[in-house]
Amino acid sequence: MRKIIVNLCCSLDGFIEGSNGEIDWCFTDQDYGMTEFLNSIDTIIFGRHSYVQLLDMAPDAFKDKKKVVCSTSLSADEHDVLIISEDLKGEIHKLIAQPGKDIWFFGGAKLMSTFLNHDLIDDMMIAVHPIVLGGGKALFTDINHRKELILSDTKTYSTGLVQLIYTIQKS
C-alpha cells in the first residue's frame, strides 16, 4: 500500500502561515531534501485553498504529478485534477490501494486534521524554521484524539532549519 506523507514547514511556534496568510518566511535557499522527496512520490493531495494558492503562485509546478483536490466547492477544471467531494475516507482508501509511489499530503491545516482524525496519514515530515511568527494558522487544530508518533529521523541544516520525520502509530 502507498503511504500518505505530510511534508510541510512550520515556524518554531507552530504556524504554517503568518497572520495574513503569508508564507514568505519559508526558506528556499537550498533544496532541503525536496528533490529526493519529490522523486519518491507521484501524487499530491491538496485542499481547495492550497490548490488555488499553488495555481496562483506556480501554475506549472508539479506537472509530472497526479493532483487530487479535496473540495466540496470545486469541480473538474482544465488542470486535469481528480476532485474528491464526498466519501473522503473511501476515495482515499481507493487511491492508496492503486499501484504507484507514495502520496504527498500538501495541505491545508483543516484538511490535515480531517485526515489525521480518520487515520489517513502515515508519516509526517515537518521542517521547523527558526522563526517565531507570533500568530497565524496553526499546524494542528481540531484533532479529536491523541496521536502517538515515532521519530524515525532528524535532519539539521546550516540555516538552523530542523526537519523532523515521524511515523504515525495508527489507532
Image (cartoon, rainbow, N blue to C red):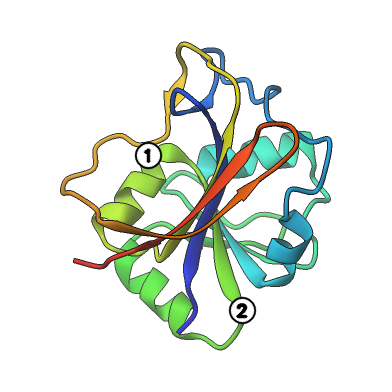
Q: In the image shown, does 106 or 7 lie closer to the viewer?
A: 7
Amino acid at dot 1: Lys
- Location of the C terminus (image quadrant): bottom left
Can residue 122 be seen from the camera position used here?
Answer: yes
- Location of the N terminus (image quadrant): bottom left
Mark 1 or mark 2, which is nearer to you? 2
| Number of dots carrying numbers | 2
Mark 2 and mark 1 in contact (Cβ < 8 Å)? Answer: no
- Provide residue 111's location: percent of width, then percent of height: 39, 46
Q: Is residue 76 left or right of residue 90?
A: right
Amino acid at dot 2: Lys
Residue closest to the far bottom: 99
Q: Circle 1 sits on which residue? A: 110
- Provide residue 3's location: percent of width, then percent of height: 47, 73
Residue at point 31%, 66% (across, down) = 89
Residue at point 58%, 46% (across, down) = 163
Can residue 87 be seen from the camera position used here?
Answer: no
